[in-house]
């Protein structure tokens, strides 16, 4: 099964959920990542129940806070 993660192709042997994908794709700080699947944001509470499908485009997003001087 072929999907795209952060613009890179990834081959999966079987359908997996987003929680498993975070591990397989070696996401940095998975507890802080925001996931977008096919242009739609997925709430953290839905990671276990959202199964990645053939052709899905997944983005791992990290929001950084900052300040001003």
Image (cartoon, helix red, strand yellow):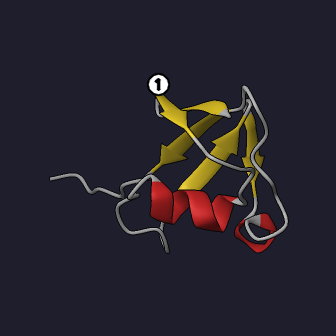
Image position of 59 with respect to 65: above or below: above
Q: Position of residue 35 (x, y in %)?
A: 62, 51
Q: Which residue lies at the image location 82% right of the left edge and 58% below the top edge?
A: 50
Q: Position of residue 65 (x, y in %)?
A: 36, 58
Q: Which residue lies at the image location 47% right of the left edge and 68% below the top edge?
A: 30
Residue with the most extreme front position: 13
Q: Position of residue 33 (x, y in %)?
A: 50, 60
Q: Residues within 10 Å of mark 1 (few under 14, many from 20)?
A: few
Residue with the most extreme left position: 69
| Residue 5 visible in the snapshot | no
Q: Which residue lies at the image location 49% right of the left edge and 47% below the top edge?
A: 61
Tell me the quarter of the image containing the N terminus. top right
| Residue 54 visible in the snapshot | yes
Describe the element under mark 1 as helix, strand or loop: loop
Q: Which residue position is annotated with label 1?
A: 7
- Quick one: 58 or 14, which is closer to the camera? 14
């Amino acid at each position: 099964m072929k999907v795209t993660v952060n613009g890179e192709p990834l081959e999966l042997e079987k359908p997996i959920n987003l929680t498993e994908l975070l591990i397989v794709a070696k996401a940095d700080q998975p507890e802080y990542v925001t996931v977008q699947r096919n242009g739609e944001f997925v709430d953290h509470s839905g990671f276990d129940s959202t199964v990645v499908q053939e052709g899905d485009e997944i983005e791992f997003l990290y929001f950084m806070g900052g300040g001003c001087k």
